[in-house]
């Protein structure tokens, strides 16, 4: 809001009244500052543009903490950086709005990890298998592992496996099981 457009219509009877013009200018400047702040709030608390404490506030609103519930294997901090926390928040928002369809999961995955592919299989026995192909960073892998990314119905177990795109001939493997029966199998070509 520019205050000049409000000062211009002042009649000639009041233009030369210095106290009135200073008072009006002061009031309009305060209003202008308030409008500027109000216009900035949606931008400041947008998941894509928020940083630091603003992201923490969004996390409180959607129910996702910046602190992972475990210590990372490489000894690094279990506190998510802004970019990974942004991924966790977007996933939580999508999970809160999930209607239980596979196409929605694929949309979520494509938005969060455009360079990795996801394939889901419903085993029809209260279990699902997710196969991931592509590279994810360590914290993103951990977010998927602890169930922060892929939504699933309550009571359904989820097995997650990675397919390596490496051209190497040696074997790479890992197997992790958590309380939620999430099994991760990573294997490269043998």
Image (cartoon, rainbow, N blue to C red):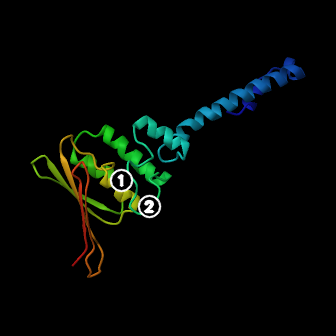
Determine if residue 98 is in view.
Answer: yes
Image point (38%, 61%), residue name: 73
Q: Position of residue 174 (x, y in %)?
A: 27, 66
Determine if residue 12 is in view.
Answer: no
Q: Position of residue 137 (x, y in %)?
A: 40, 62
Image point (53%, 41%), residue name: 54
Q: Which mark is residue 75?
A: 2
Q: Quadrant of the C terminus?
A: bottom left
**Precedes in sequence: disc 2 or disc 1:** 2
Q: Position of residue 8 (x, y in %)?
A: 77, 27
- Left or right of 174? Residue 19 is right
Element marked by disc 1 = helix
Q: Is residue 131 above or below residue 153?
A: below
Q: Hey, which residue is sitting farthest top in the picture?
A: 13
Report which residue position mark 1 lands on.
143
Q: Is residue 135 above or below residue 49?
A: below
Q: Quadrant of the N terminus?
A: top right
Instruction: Name the residue nearer the viewer: 75 or 180.
Output: 75
- Crowding at dot 1, Cα within 10 Å, few <14 / some 14-19 / many 20+, comes out as many
Q: Work out how far the residue at label 2 is from the one at label 1, CA to CA, in angstroms.
A: 16 Å
Image point (18%, 41%), residue name: 155
Q: Position of residue 28 (x, y in %)?
A: 73, 26
- Left or right of 45? Residue 184 is left
């Amino acid at each position: 809001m520019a205050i000049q457009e409000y000062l211009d219509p002042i009649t000639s009877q009041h233009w030369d009244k210095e106290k009135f013009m200073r008072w009006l200018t002061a009031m309009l400047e305060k209003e202008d500052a308030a409008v500027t702040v109000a216009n900035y709030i949606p931008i400041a608390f947008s998941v894509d543009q928020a940083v630091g404490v603003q992201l923490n506030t969004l996390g409180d609103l959607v129910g996702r903490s910046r602190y992972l519930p475990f210590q990372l294997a490489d000894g690094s901090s279990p506190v998510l950086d802004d970019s990974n926390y942004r991924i966790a928040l977007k996933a939580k928002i999508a999970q809160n709005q999930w209607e239980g369809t596979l196409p929605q999961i694929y949309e979520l995955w494509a938005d969060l990890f455009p360079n990795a592919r996801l394939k889901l299989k419903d085993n029809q026995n209260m279990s699902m298998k997710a196969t991931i192909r592509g590279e994810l960073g360590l914290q993103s892998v951990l977010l998927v592992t602890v169930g922060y990314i892929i939504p699933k119905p309550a009571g359904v177990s989820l097995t997650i496996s990675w397919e390596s795109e490496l051209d190497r001939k040696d074997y790479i493997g890992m197997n992790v099981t958590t309380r939620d029966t999430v099994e991760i199998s990573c294997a490269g070509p043998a």
